Image (cartoon, helix red, strand yellow):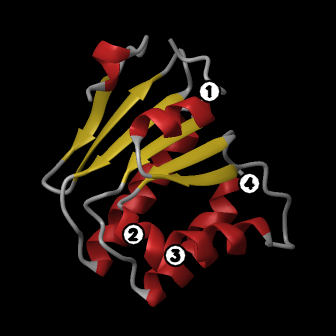
Amino acid sequence: MHLASQHNFQLQTVYEDEYLKVEIDEKQSFIYVEWYKHPSSDKFRQLFQKLAAITIDNKIEYWLSDARAIHYLEFSDQNWLLQTVAPLLKKSTLKKFARVTTKEGLALMDATRIYSGIEQQRDFEVKTKFELFISKEAALDWLYDGDYH
């Protein structure tokens, strides 16, 4: 499914490499990240920092990540996300983050651990809601409460 053709998104590609493609719709404060292949730990961290910067700089409110190509997250990368990226959320306008994963990825529950860890951060109030999906359609329904056409 290509989002721009099926929905009212005016997507512009702002970054692309062999690992992922990043598109944003400034009017809808939306970012779409499609991972093409499983990155190394170093590459994952480098790219996620870039994604966080794009999100903050563009005042993104809704993030859809198609992470089906990421089979798992190393425990050290999970901790890195909690320690490094979670505090960035305080600076962001991000309201909702939807991650599309595989059924196998859902079973691993690594993202669930990260999301609950972020939501339990005592240092700051987290405004962002997180959810996991196995389809883009379900993720978009949740992001926009069914109102994205």
Q: Quadrant of the N terminus?
A: top left
Label disc, if present, on residue 105 of the rendered structure: 2
Q: Residue furthest bottom?
A: 76
Please say if the residues under marks 1 and 3 sit with CB atoms less than 8 Å apart. Answer: no
**Where's residue 74, x and y in %?**
39, 85
Q: Residues within 10 Å of mark 3 (few under 14, many from 20)?
A: few
Whichever of labels 4 and 3 marks the residue nearer the N terminus, that label is 4
**130 versus 122 height, above or below:** above
Q: Is residue 90 above or below residue 29?
A: below
Q: Which residue is mark 3?
A: 109
The residue under the point 39% across, 58% down is 101
Residue 56, x across and y down, in percent: 57, 43
Which badge, 1 or 3, is on the more N-terminal residue? 3
Q: CA distance from mark 4 to mark 1?
A: 21 Å
Q: CA distance from mark 1 to mark 3?
A: 24 Å
Q: CA distance from mark 4 to mark 2?
A: 27 Å
Judged from the image, the secondary structure of the residue bearing numbered disc 1 is loop
In the picture provided, is 31 more to the left or to the right than 113?
Answer: left
- Residue 51 appears at what percent x and percent y? 43, 51
- Badge 4, how many Cα within 10 Å: few under 14, some, many 20+? some
